[in-house]
Amino acid sequence: MLPNHSVPAERRRSWAEPYRIKMVELLKMTTPAERRVALEAAGYNTFLLRSDDVYIDLLTDSGTSAMSDAQWAGMMRGDEAYAGSRNFYGLESAVQARYGYRYVVPTHQGRGAEHLISRILISPGDVVPGNMYFTTTRLHQELAGATFVDVIIDQAHDPESLYPFKGNIDLDKFRELIDRVGAKKIPYISVAATVNMAGGQPISMENIRQVSQLARQHGIRVILDATRAIENAWFIKQREAGFADRSIASILLEMCSYTDGCTMSGKKDLLVNIGGFLALNDWEVFEEARNLVVVYEGLHTYGGLSGRDMEAMAIGIEEALNEDHIRARIGQVEYLGQQLIQAGIPIVLPVGGHAIYLDARSFLPHVPQDEFPAQSLAAELYLEAGIRAMERGVISAGRNLQTGQHNYPKLELVRLTIPRRVYTQAHMDVTAESVINLYERREAIGGLKMIYEPKYLRFFQARFEPVAVGTSREKRGEYADPQEA
Ligand code: PLI
C-alpha cells in the first residue's frame, strides 16, 4: 500500500531519523563458536573484545556517534597552529553562547576537565557530594584527596520507581552533610545531568535551582557535569511543568545559569569522536585551570585537541541543540525500551536518555552479587548475538579506597548504550530479540569469578572466568548490604 501522505504529521505515530545515510561501515557477522573464542580471549570482559568481533556495539555512546557532513567539512577547516587556532575561538564562542559560561579551557575529553577542576578546588580531607557517582569523576575527586558522598534521591536506587526526575538531589541529604562536615569542607557539589549510573535519569530544573540556592547560601560552588545536559534539557521540556513551549537551547542556558562551571565530555551530546572542555565563570579558577592545562593537556588554546577536533565540536553543539535531532535520538532509545518492557524484561524505568539498563538482579536472581551478575549477563549477550554491552554494577563501583572492600551498589545493571546517528530501527529490533532470547534461557546463566583486577577503574581491564551454574544456585539471593558506591 502506498503511504498516505494526507495524514497530518502530528497524527503520525511512527518517527524517522532526521538524516539520510551517505556512507556505511561494514560489520562482520560472527558465529557462536567464533564469539566463544573471542570472549574467552577477552576474559569475559566486553571492554577487552576487539571491535572487529562485535556486530552491534552498544558498549558506550561515548565518542561513537556518526559525525555529519557539516562536521566532516569542518574538519577540513582545522587550523593546526600551535597557538591561537581559529577553531579554538569558534569553540569558545559556541560554548559561551550555548552554555553561558564566561571562560573555556579545551581538554582532550571529559576526564581531562575533571582532573583540572578536582586539582584546583579540592584540598585533602574535603568532601564532594554528588547525584550518584560517575567512575572517572569520583576517582579524580578521590585522587585529589576528597571523599565522595552520594546525595541523590532514594528513588534513583530503585529500578522500578517511575519518578520522572530520578537524577534529583535530595536537599535534606545535602543539608545534613553541610551540618555534619561544615561548608568549609565542601568545595563544590557535583551535579550530573543526566545521571549515567542511575540509568540516564534527568534532574529537574526546580531541583538544580534549589540545589544552587542552598549551595550558594553556604559559599559552596556548583559544578555541572554537562556531558549529557542537552538530553537532560529534553526531559525537562517533556516532563516539567512550564517548559513545554521553551526551546532546548533556552532550557540548557537556564540549567547552566544555576551553576559556576561545568566539565564536559564532548564525546556524548556534542557528536564528536574526541574532545571536551572545562567552562567556568570565576576568573581565579579559570586562571588556575589555564595554568594547569598547559602541564597536563596542552596549550590553553588546544588542550589536547587538534584544531579540526575543536571545529567539529563547535558544529556539534549546534547540531545537538536541534530539536528534531534530540527527539529522534531519545526516541530511538525509547523504542528499544518499549520493546523490552512489552516482553516483560526487567529494565530501569523510566527509560533514560542514552541507554537501556537491564536490571541484572531481577534478570539473574540466582547469581549472587559477588559473582557479578551484570558482568555475566553482558558476556552472555555477546555470546548470544555479538552485541556488546557494558557492566554497570559492582565491578564498575570498584573498591572502597579506605577499607579495600567492594562497593556494593544497589543497582546491578547492564547498559545497552545507543550511539547517536549510528544504528537503525532494525538494529534495535535485533537487540530486543536477542535480549528476549537470553531472558528465556536465563536459568542456565551462571556467575563469574574475577581472576585479574587492576588498581584503578577495574571494569576496563579486569578478567573473569565462569563459575559453575550450580554453585551460584546454592547461594541464591545472597546480596551484600548495599553501601554508598
Ligand atoms: O570519557 P570522558 O573522559 O570523555 O568523560 C567522562 C565522563 C564524565 N561524565 C559522565 C556522565 C560520563 O558519562 C563520562 C564518560 N562516560 C563514558 C565513557 C560512558 O561510557 O558512559
Image (cartoon, grey):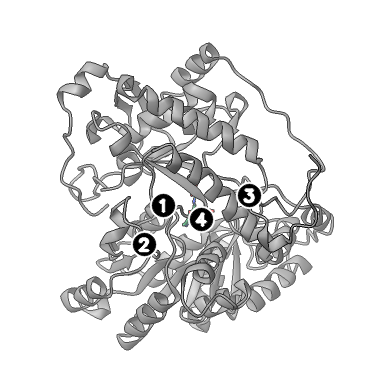
Give neighbour class at mark 4: few <14, some 14-19, many 20+ (Cα, 10 Å).
Answer: many
Secondary structure found at label 2:
loop
Residue matched to label 4:
353
Specify which label sits upstream in the sequence, 3 or 1.
1
**Gap in Å between the C-alphas at discs 2 and 3?**
23 Å
Q: Is residue 317 left or right of residue 479?
A: right
Specify which label sits upstream in the sequence, 3 or 4.
4
Task: Identify the image quadrant of residue 126.
Answer: bottom left
Question: What residue is rendered at 30% in x and 33% in y?
Answer: 372
**Gap in Å between the C-alphas at discs 4 and 2?**
12 Å
Q: Is residue 69 left or right of residue 13?
A: right
Residue 36 versus residue 301: which sits nearer the camera?
Answer: 36
Secondary structure found at label 3:
loop
Cβ atoms at labels 1 and 2 below 8 Å apart? yes
**Gap in Å between the C-alphas at discs 3 and 4?**
11 Å
Residue matched to label 1:
199
Residue 62 versus residue 232: which sits nearer the camera?
Answer: 232
Residue 370 placed where, x, y %? 23, 33
Residue 375 placed where, x, y %? 37, 33
**Residue 213 visible within the image:** yes
Label 1 within 8 A of ligand 1 by Cβ: no
Please tell me whether residue 10 is drawn above or below residue 57 in the rendered image.
Answer: below
For residue 420, the mark is: 3
Secondary structure found at label 4:
loop
Residue matched to label 2:
166
Cβ atoms at labels 1 and 4 below 8 Å apart? no
Specify which label sits upstream in the sequence, 1 or 2.
2
Specify which label sits upstream in the sequence, 4 or 2.
2
- Of tags 2 and 3, which is closer to the observer? 2
